[in-house]
Amino acid sequence: MVTFDEFARLEIRVGRIVSADDHEQARKPMYRLTVDLGPEVGKRTIVAGIKAWYAKEELVGKEVACIVNLDPKTIAGVESRGMLLAAGDGVEALSLLTVDRQVSEGSMVR
């Protein structure tokens, strides 16, 4: 079990995907995304293994929930500075968590 205090340590913000490129060096099909997380956090590179479910063109402009206070992780030579949140089994179905109304980039998920 996770305590509420442990969960509250996660900084989850809404980000707008501004670019999506193939991550050619990755062993698995992945994208290198640039995500605008608002003025406090700025733009970040996030590597995501969502290529099997999303075309690059449909990602650009999408507002997604991201964890922004994870330790950076280098994935096939690219530093990833966040994680997109998604739902699904990761095999046949996967859906990015998005907002259903317009909110500013960087808005906190509460």
Image: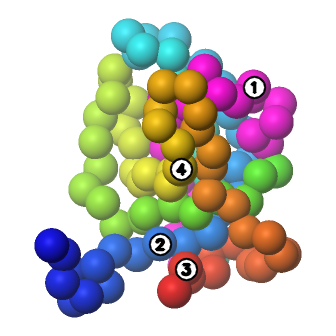
Query: Secondary structure beneath disc 3?
Result: loop
Disc 1 and disc 3 in contact, CB within 8 angstroms: no
Residue 51 in sight in this render = no
Q: Secondary structure at mark 2?
A: strand
Label 4 and label 2: CA atoms lie apart by 13 Å
Q: Which residue corresponds to the image point at 84% horizontal and 75% vertical from the top-left?
A: 102
Q: What type is the residue that disc 2 sits on?
A: Ile
Q: Which residue is mark 3?
A: 109
In the rendered image of this protein, does residue 2 appear above or below residue 97?
below
For residue 73: magenta?
no
Q: Residues at badges 1 and 2 in contact (C-beta under 8 Å)?
A: no
Q: State which tag comes first along the sequence, 1 or 4.
A: 1
Depth check: 42 or 63 in front? Answer: 63
Report the disc number at residue 86.
4
Q: CA distance from mark 4 to mark 3?
A: 14 Å
Dot 1 or dot 3: first in sequence order is 1
Of marks 4 and 2, which one's residue comes earlier in the chain? 2
Q: Secondary structure at mark 1?
A: loop
Separation of residues labelled 2 and 3 (CA atoms): 5 Å
Q: Residues within 10 Å of mark 4 (few under 14, many from 20)?
A: some
Q: Residue at x 29, y 50 (%)?
A: 72
**Marks 1/3: CA distance?**
26 Å
Residue 39, position as x, y percentages in the image: 63, 76
Q: Which residue is mark 1?
A: 55
In this rendering, would 100 be left or right of 80? right
Q: Which mark, residue 12? A: 2
The amino acid type, in three-letter code, at marker 3 is: Val
Q: Amino acid at mark 4?
A: Ala
